[in-house]
Amino acid sequence: METRSITAEVRMAPRMTEDPAQLVPELAEVSAALFRATGNGSVPRTTISLVQLRAGQIVGSTYLTVLHTGFLRKAGESEERITSVASWADSPYFTGAERAALALVEAVLQPSVHGERVSDELYGRATEHYDARALATLMFAIGQVNFFIAVALIAKPVPGRSFTDPWQ
């Protein structure tokens, strides 16, 4: 197994030089359907972006953290909210609904020493803020970012490049 020194510079080139979407064109349909499903308006787009930013942070994907940080900036979110996503539990910048969403993505992506990842208590807190359709949409938003986590970690697109052109 090859290891990289933490002081070594990271190259700005994708690991996979061919665009996976061009290699598997069926991906475009799946991706478009996921974006339509999560963009149905039942959960604010900002909340979805906060959740997806947190997912990128949890899995250690610079590509996803840069991408979702950019989406949040374009949506007019404050730097305080964006930068405190990593420490949301101690941050005063999030609503109860956003906190429930952030707790859900953490529960899904991180192992639990106490058994079930998404406890009945956490599910109950989420239902206090989201109706059934919104909760389903939030689940799909977490699934959507999980779908792209594999691409981000395996193919390693270049952070900061256009969402549609990270492979050059």
Image: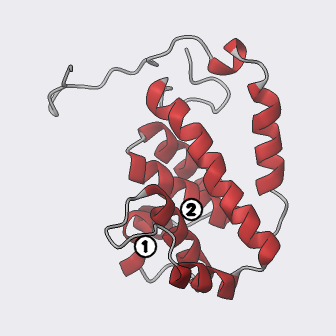
Q: Do tag 1 and tag 2 residues touch (Cβ < 8 Å)?
A: yes
Which label's residue is closer to the chain start, 1 or 2?
2
Which residue carries the number 2 mark?
Answer: 50
Q: Mark 1: which amino acid?
A: Trp
- Which label belongs to residue 158? none
In space, the residues marked 1 and 2 are separated at their CA atoms by 10 Å
Image quadrant in which the C terminus is located? top right
Question: Can residue 11 be seen from the camera position used here?
Answer: yes
Q: Residues within 10 Å of mark 1 (few under 14, many from 20)?
A: some
- Residue 66 picture location, percent across and down: 49, 44
Residue on which the image places disc 1: 88
Q: Residue at x 36, y 80 (%)?
A: 90
Residue 25 quadrant: top right
Q: Is residue 18 left or right of residue 2?
A: right
Please indicate whether residue 126 sits to the left or right of residue 90 in the image: right
The structure's colour scheme is secondary structure
Q: Secondary structure at mark 2?
A: helix
On the question of residue 160 being in view, the answer is no
In this view, 89 is above or below 145: below
The answer to which image quadrant residue 148 occupies is top right
Q: Helix, strand or loop at disc 1?
A: helix
**As drawn, 108 above or below 31:** below
Residue 102 percent coordinates (x, y): 52, 69
Q: Nearer the viewer, residue 90 or 106?
A: 106
Crowd around label 2: few <14 · some 14–19 · many ≥20 (10 Å): many
Q: How many marks?
A: 2
Q: Is residue 110 left or right of residue 50?
A: left
